[in-house]
Amino acid sequence: MSSTLRGATALKVFLCFAAGYLISYGLRSVNAVIAPVLVADLHLSSADLGLLSSAYFVSFATLQLPLGVWLDRYGPRRIEAGLLLIAALGAAVFATATTLTGLWIGRALIGVGVSACLMAAFKAYRQWFAPEQQSRLASFMLVAGTSGALSATLPVTMAVPAIGWRGVFWVVAGAIVLVAAAIFFLLRDVERAHPLPAAAASADGAYAKIFGSAYFWRFALLGLINHGSFFALQTLWAGPWMSQVLGKTTAETSSILFVLNLVLMLAYLALGWAAPRLAARGWHAHSLIGWGIGAMLLAQLGMLFGGWGWWLVLALFVPVTTIVQSHLALAFPASQAGRINSAYNLQLFVGAFVVQWGIGVLIDVFRSHGADAATALRAALACCVGLQVLSWLHFLLRRVAAPAEN
């Protein structure tokens, strides 16, 4: 059905889904800020911290494939509202946990609960908004998400001394319930006016075709390794890097992470403006991706030997990863678009889980062989960058025809 949502109704739909994604991204990033407090309170090792934070990613990733089917079958309103209640439960479990196991369970429940926040929004936008509005809505969602990352820096740092990290998670649990209620009740009339197609979605073998495609893997490895690595850094290891490698205080670290996410948000906006103009001038998506990922790698090499300004350079080029996902979705038939996005998201969050935990394991290994904290973290990041270089070279050298060209 063609859709023409405009005015107050369109704004209501966007704000409901944007609020969910803002909270999702904030919860994804908050451990980078509260990591020192968690370590001090519960005596966690670096590997424990990496495993704890990665619980979000592994549980999030587990939901991606069934999520694509659920959204097509039951619609975004019911699915996201229901899952958000699980996220609220997870925040409450995290707030009351006294062991690593309890924290891990809470973090995993949060990952399950927010797993639909972006995909449900994209499904709703495709169903309820006109085609020409899609790219703008996607850009605005990324801005909302990055705003969530901003909220997990200075605001959380100021709140922790007043109410503690447990109090922060109780506040978040309440906010999640409010957002779930808004999506479920405020969007009911919109969903009735724009119902799902009569035919229910079926598992027609689309996933098998996707995962069997060499073209998919040419791009998906960038999501798995390069994009996943940035998520692991942004949501956890950026904080320890600032304090242990660069010697920043907690307040300085929070301020730097705030600036990092602000630059990232502005970069998303800039890419939304520049991408169609670059395309009009003959820049193919493959070229933009190749140069952008290459610039991300150079920035990380600078991070290994330089100051925190190199993290801002990295943030300037990270938005190129959105071109990877959007180009991949367009390369497959429209009937598979939802499953393509879910399949790509699966790679991204599996990569974030492995890298986030793996860096922690590597740090402990290097420390056990006599390296100090700064040297161990630098060595772990160097290993991560090496893997990213291999993924980037695979993308550049592995020329495969798109499915539509086969």
Image (cartoon, grey):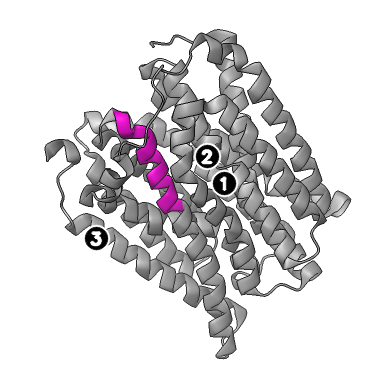
Rate crowding at label 1 as few (under 14), some (14 to 19) or many (20 or more) other CA atoms within 10 Å. Answer: many
Q: Residue at x 24, y 60 (%)?
A: 394
- Residue 166 coordinates in the image, percent (x, y): 81, 53
Judge whether residue 404 can be spotted in this image: yes
How many marks the image carries: the answer is 3
Judge whether residue 122 can be spotted in this image: no
| Up-down relation of residue 12 to residue 19 (above or below) | above
Which residue is the site of mark 3? 394
**Which residue type does callout 1 highlight?**
Asn
- Residue 213 coordinates in the image, percent (x, y): 23, 49
Give the image quarter of residue 280: top left
Q: Quadrant of the C terminus?
A: top left
Whether tag 1 and tag 2 are in contact, CB under 8 A, the answer is: yes
**Which residue type does callout 2 highlight?**
Met
Give the image quarter of residue 330: top left
Distance, label 3 to label 1, CA atoms, is 29 Å
Does dot 1 land on a helix, a strand or a loop? Answer: helix
Give the image quarter of residue 202: top left
Does dot 2 land on a helix, a strand or a loop? Answer: helix
Does dot 3 land on a helix, a strand or a loop? Answer: helix
Which residue is the site of mark 2? 265
Q: Residue at x 30, y 61 (%)?
A: 391
Query: Which residues fall within the magenta stretch?
Result: 335-348
Task: Please tell me which of labels 3 and 2 falls first in the chain.
Answer: 2
**Is 362 inside the magenta-drawn segment?**
no
Q: Quadrant of the N terminus?
A: top left
Q: Residue furthest left?
A: 406
Which residue is the site of mark 1? 261
- Residue 24 coordinates in the image, percent (x, y): 61, 42
